[in-house]
Amino acid sequence: MSTDLSRKKKLRGAHRASATRLQKTVSEVLISFDPNNLEEIVPKLNQLKTSMKEKLETLKVLDEEILELVDEANIEEEIEQCDICREGLQLALENVERALNTSSMSSLAVLSNVTENTTSNTPPVPSQAPTSPQGSSASTASTSLLQNQYSSQLDTSNENGMPNLGQPSMSTVNQPQPVEHPTIPHLHHPITLGGIQLSNQSIM
């Protein structure tokens, strides 16, 4: 066996031993898995997941390099050992990923319950109907019309607050009217009234 092949096999053996310890740690963590203690378990599972992915990649590279250096008689046995080691590591990796998915679903369920409880305990906020600009303009126009009508009535009212309906103005009432004297017709002949004879001169 060449020195290079011997060195690579020794290096691969160390990585395989490390992979075995990783699988054992994964089994212990999954057995003690507690959905109520995700803050402590999830970081550990993520760390194991990263370590196993790196270990699989390292073992794959070493296995390919060793297969190029072994004798043809040992190729079949070498491939079988490589598959067994990597299959166990891949199975442990899948279990870790499944546990992480379960943890994520549990976290979402807890968050959903908290959100629902918070929403149910919050009193509803009464909605206010928005004021229509058209309605506001119509109301303003109606108010202005009433004010104009009221002002018009005040302008045409007398001192008692009653509307002036064709009554003469104060200037017309206070102005003195000329007195007309009755016209006495001219008497051509004297008139006797109560034994007294009247003429135009006595009447004037």
Image: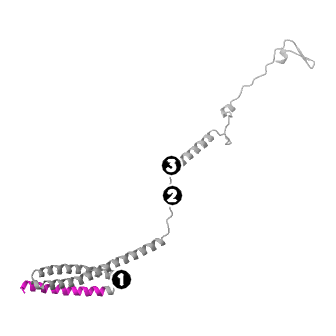
The kind of residue on which mark 1 rests is Asn
Q: Residues within 10 Å of mark 1 (few under 14, many from 20)?
A: few
How far across and how far down the image is residue 152, in percent? 60, 40
Q: Residues within 10 Å of mark 3 (few under 14, many from 20)?
A: few
Q: Is residue 175 magenta?
A: no
Q: Is residue 106 left or right of residue 163?
A: left
Q: Quadrant of the N terminus?
A: bottom left
Taking the view exactly as shown, the residue that stands out farthest to the right is 195
The kind of residue on which mark 2 rests is Ala
Taking the view exactly as shown, the residue that stands out farthest to the left is 2
Residue appearing at x 6%, y 85% in the figure: 3
Q: Is residue 15 left or right of residue 32?
A: left
Of the pair 193 and 32, the residue shown nearer to us: 32
- 132 over 71 or under it: above or below: above
Q: Is residue 5 left or right of residue 179?
A: left
How far across and how far down the image is residue 56, in percent? 20, 80
Residue for badge 2: 129
Q: Residues within 10 Å of mark 2 (few under 14, many from 20)?
A: few
**Mark 2 or mark 1: which comes first in sequence?**
1
* Segment tinted magenta in the rendering: 1-29
Residue appearing at x 12%, y 85% in the figure: 74
SS type, badge 3: helix
SS type, badge 2: loop
The kind of residue on which mark 3 rests is Gln
Residue for badge 1: 37
Q: Is residue 21 magenta?
A: yes
Residue for badge 3: 134
